Amino acid sequence: MTPIAGLPRAPTRQAILILGMHRSGTSALGGVINALGAAGPKTPLPSHAANPRGFFESAPLSLAHDELLASVGSSWLDWRQLKPQRINSEATEPYRRRIKQLLIDEFGYEPLIVIKDPRTCRFVPFMSSILDEMNVSPVALLPIRNPLEVAYSLHRRDKMALPKSLLLWLRHVLEAEYHSRHMPRYILSYEGFLVDWRKHMDRAAEKTGVVWPAHPDRSDVKVEQFLTTDLYHERSTPEDMRHHPEVASLVRETYQILSTIAAGDEDNGLLDQLDIMRTRFDDACETFSAAMATEELAVVQLRGELSTRSTETERARQENSKLASFLEQQSLEVRGLAAERDALVGTRGTLIAERDALVNAQASLIAERDALLRDMSCIANERDALLRSRSWRLTAPLRLIGGLFPRG
């Protein structure tokens, strides 16, 4: 909607873009910025062993960025240059609309938001144009970490070879630096940030014009609980990097230039040097990327097969776990039935004993009854004999008289 002439434009919202290579402290920076009052995403990535205190990164937005890169034949671990004509083609228009909608869904209309995803380093102009459509002003913070530490961290987390990690670092920092030059921005050292985050957040506000909604003094406890050096696992000195056989001169020189900017201020001479580094890197990519593509394709295919096998193994493990649970349940039921059976056997034994006792008692009663019947029969016989005897005694005189005085 076009503003009406003469009326002031609505206040511009701000989006802090954290433009840093993977494993460069972007999550630590995102956590501190969130503690200072910038709105984070509504659907953050869940914490992980690699980031136990959270990523401060939108899960659906990260997925959309992956799909955007895939649509132009790239990925998060691709160190080759992403051609502007490919990222700004009609093929990416659906992803532009989707990312814009996700930004609205994830952040609403908050005045200050923080967008953190290392993938964004690869397509800063694409993201900037979307924010411009939303009347959101981008501000860039670029954390710079020793590339050897980054490579060690990626190797520990993803088993990625050091040379490839270093190429990834080079691509991310050069693209992020070049395409954020038109924005208010602040380049900072990751190590320095861990030592004194307050100084760097004050400098970031001064350089970019951001006003932290929650003043650092009121956020100290929250930040101190979150930002601890125990998460700073991989440590390498500039001397380590200078003498490491797998660190190319292009990586060392780029890190030195960026460290100089982080320690002081930007100047055209340093930016010109970075332009030279970027040109040298792009030329080398043009020369060697075709040869590397076939090898990397084979690696990707092998990773895909490994992922499939891992998925099948995990599925089998889950099925075995379910079967074990089922068998354990069946075992519990069998044990329960056996206990019931034993109880019934015990009850049966008791009932049989009671039945036998009753049978014996019945036999005793029958014997007693028979004895009583015999006694009663004897008594009846004795009674009948007595009655007969008595009757004879009573009738004997009469019979005597009759004999003495016969009739007739």
Image (cartoon, grey):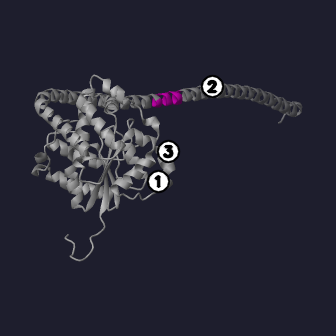
Vertical relation: 128 (above or below) 251: below
The picture places residue 190, in percent across and down from the top left corner, at 38, 40
Magenta stretch contains residue 251:
no
Query: Marks 3 and 1: in contact by CB < 8 Å?
Result: no
| Numbered tag placed on residue 225 in the rendering | 3
Element at label 1: helix
Mark 2 against mark 3, which lies toward the viewer? 3
The picture places residue 19, in percent across and down from the top left corner, at 29, 46
Which residue is rendered at x = 26% and y = 36% of the image? 254
> Residue extending furthest bottom?
6
Question: Residue 251 or 109: which is nearer the viewer?
Answer: 251
Element at label 2: helix
> Dot 1 corresponds to which residue?
216
**Magenta-tinted stretch:** 332-341
Vertical relation: 181 (above or below) 3: above
Give the prevailing secondary structure in the magenta stretch: helix
